[in-house]
Image: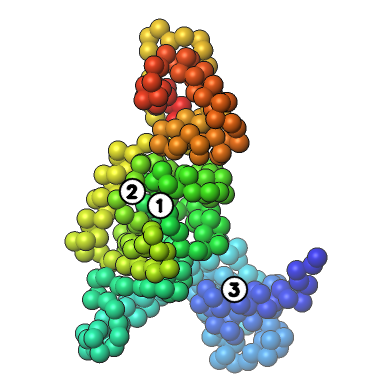
């Protein structure tokens, strides 16, 4: 199905230039130039309805942005320049303007907060910790996630706030280059469908994942900008509270807690450790494991129960035990603990 016609192109071009900070008259002139160049500037003015000072100002704006040449005396033909350098300049200007706008809005809000105490405004925040409850949690989580520029760090564990698009949003964040480091609890891996439909797709897209038996708190850290702490209740999951912590002593403590837990957690699905082999490694142990064996080992080292592992792999418990015994024999392990240790040493996890 067609998505547009040639008649839409001038409108899209004009809108794109305006988003980059180019004025409406200059955008109109640039579009006409692309259609007719090389052409004299007065002829462009006749085609666009721009005359006199307005025409000169529009062309000067394009020249300053690096989109057209600067030498025009009214008699020579004009033409657009290759736009790469000009677009970079416009992009930097726009970014600087947005930064200045953010500072202005944030400063205005802080001034408002100082004038209006929280008790009189109904604001459940002290400037460092914002309290979000009920249906406001979903939009607040999505807003924070979308704002990430460099890194998201997360402790993941049920119960989950119902956000149907959560996995898609995680994949989109990974696609735009944001690093995601997630420590999953064992309950996360055992939660029905979570491994197949959420965790594994994100890991395949580049997420760095590790696992522990129990995470200390449900936590999301967005860059160095804020931390979101969930206070959901396991037994009755009809009351939700989310704390949004701004940079402060508490934020630093949460960041340190994540990094400490990350260091002690076990890699999950594809995280690589240095390859270390015993000097007399047998041929069977040297042979790399299959993808299915890697997945089995990752689940076992994550502390997932045998029932949950068998369910995730789509096999019976008897088949599971047989596969574990084969892996233990290959690695010379007498216990599952030794199996996990040897698998880590060989880079199988």
Q: How many marks?
A: 3
Residue drawn at (63%, 92%), measured in percent from left and top?
51
The answer to whether marks 1 and 2 mark residues whose Cβ atoms lie closer than 8 Å is: yes
Q: Nearer the viewer, residue 172 or 95?
A: 172
Q: How far apart are marks 2 and 3 (CA)?
A: 45 Å
Q: How far apart are marks 1 and 3 (CA)?
A: 42 Å
Residue under circle 1? 157
Tag 3 or tag 2, which sits nearer the N-term? 3
Residue under circle 3? 16
Q: Quadrant of residue 32?
A: bottom right
Residue drawn at (39%, 68%), measured in percent from left and top?
240
Question: Residue 215's mark?
Answer: 2
Q: Which of 341 and 307 is in front in this view?
A: 307
From this view, report whether residue 156 is shown above or below residue 139: above
Quarter of the figure with the C terminus: top left
Tag 3 or tag 1, which sits nearer the N-term? 3
Within-10-Å neighbours for mark 2: few <14, some 14–19, many 20+: many
Determine the secondary structure under disc 2. loop
Q: Which of 316 and 244 is in front in this view?
A: 316
**Place of residue 282 in the rendered image (x, y in percent of width and height, measured from the top left):** 47, 9
Determine the secondary structure under disc 3. helix
Residue at the outermost top position: 280
Within-10-Å neighbours for mark 3: few <14, some 14–19, many 20+: few
**Place of residue 125 in the rendered image (x, y in percent of width and height, measured from the top left):** 27, 76
Instruction: Decide if residue 14 is on the left or right side of residue 107.
Output: right
- Dot in front, 1 or 3: 1
Q: Nearer the viewer, residue 168 or 231?
A: 231
Quarter of the figure with the N terminus: bottom right
């Amino acid at each position: 199905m067609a998505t547009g016609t040639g008649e839409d192109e001038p409108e899209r071009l004009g809108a794109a230039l305006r988003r980059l900070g180019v004025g409406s008259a200059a955008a109109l002139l640039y579009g006409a130039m692309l259609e007719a160049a090389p052409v004299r500037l007065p002829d462009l003015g006749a085609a666009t309805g721009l005359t006199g000072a307005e025409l000169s100002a529009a062309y000067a704006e394009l020249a300053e942005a690096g989109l057209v040449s600067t030498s025009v005396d009214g008699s020579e033909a004009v033409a657009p320049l290759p736009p790469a350098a000009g677009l970079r300049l416009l992009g930097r200007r726009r970014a600087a303007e947005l930064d200045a706008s953010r500072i202005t809005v944030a400063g205005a809000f802080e001034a408002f907060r100082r004038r209006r105490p929280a008790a009189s405004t109904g604001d459940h925040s002290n400037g460092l910790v914002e309290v979000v409850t009920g249906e406001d949690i979903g939009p607040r989580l999505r807003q924070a996630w979308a704002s990430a520029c460099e890194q998201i760090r997360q402790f993941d564990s049920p119960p989950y706030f119902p956000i149907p698009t959560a996995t898609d949003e995680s994949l989109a964040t990974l696609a735009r280059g944001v690093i995601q480091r997630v420590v999953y609890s064992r309950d996360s891996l055992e939660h029905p469908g979570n491994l197949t439909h959420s965790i594994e797709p994100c890991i395949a897209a580049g997420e760095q994942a590790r696992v522990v038996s129990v995470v200390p708190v449900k936590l999301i850290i967005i860059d160095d900008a804020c931390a979101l702490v969930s206070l959901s209740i396991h037994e009755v999951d009809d009351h939700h509270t989310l704390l949004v912590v701004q940079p402060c002593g508490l934020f630093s403590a949460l960041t340190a807690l994540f990094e400490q837990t990350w260091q002690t957690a076990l890699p999950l699905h594809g995280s690589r450790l240095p390859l270390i082999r015993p000097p007399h490694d047998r041929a069977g142990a040297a042979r790399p494991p299959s993808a299915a064996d890697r997945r089995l080992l990752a689940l076992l080292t994550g502390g997932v129960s045998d029932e949950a592992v068998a369910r995730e792999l789509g096999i019976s418990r008897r088949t599971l035990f047989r596969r574990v015994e084969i892996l233990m024999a290959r690695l010379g392990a007498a216990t599952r603990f030794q199996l996990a240790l040897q698998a880590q040493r060989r880079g199988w996890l």
